[in-house]
Image: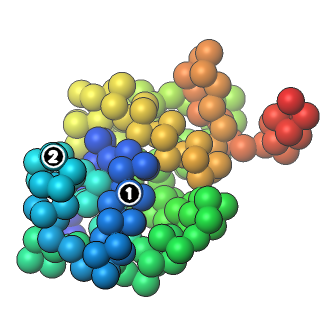
Amino acid sequence: MGQESRLFPLEARLGTVLGLIELVVAYGGRADLAQIARELRATLDDILPASEAAEQLGLIKIEDGEGVVTPLGLRISRSLAKGKKKLLKEQLPNLEPFATAIRLSKEKAEGFTAEDVASELSQKIQHHSYIENLESLHELLVDWLLYTELLSYDGDTRQFKPKSRRYQQSSSLE
């Protein structure tokens, strides 16, 4: 039986995932996730999206309720912002919905929306949670794709576009 495709958690925000990695590293590389939740005055359900995202990114392994930092997670933790971006930029294209967004950027140079990504995914893997939560999907894509600079974004049209030299040059002139 093939491995079921897991979609990146809609609620997993970049800052929360990176913060979780920092906490696990601060605990010596292994930490009880329920204990972390209690210390943050949150529930385990509140940090599960971040821990699942961190695991999908290869930053931690979850073993018996504990987060165990991986070598990649340790590298992320020790990196400055530019290094974090580079390492995450290498990981995101392997995960959905980011893989579909990157593919759409190559097929639709004029731009595409979060709805386009959700539509593609619902056809491809018969998964409708992204269609049902378009605004959350939009926020997820903006959060991760802009931080890693994999794509550019037009806030007026809410469209994602391929990163172009022209865009990079004009934004550096501002």
Q: Residues within 10 Å of mark 2 (few under 14, many from 20)?
A: few
- Along the horizontal axis of the image, is 60 left or right of 102? left
Split into 4 quadrants, where in the image is the N terminus?
bottom left
- Along the horizontal axis of the image, is 144 left or right of 69? right
Q: Which residue is mark 1?
A: 19
**Closer to us: 157 or 142:** 142
Q: Secondary structure at mark 2?
A: loop
Q: Which residue is mark 2?
A: 42
Amino acid type, label 1? Gly
Q: Which mark is residue 82?
A: none
**Closer to us: 115 or 76:** 76
Marks 2 and 1, how far apart at CA: 14 Å
- Image height of 66 relative to 56, above or below: below
Q: Position of residue 167 (x, y in %)?
A: 81, 36
Q: Position of residue 123 (x, y in %)?
A: 31, 40
Q: Position of residue 170 (x, y in %)?
A: 87, 33
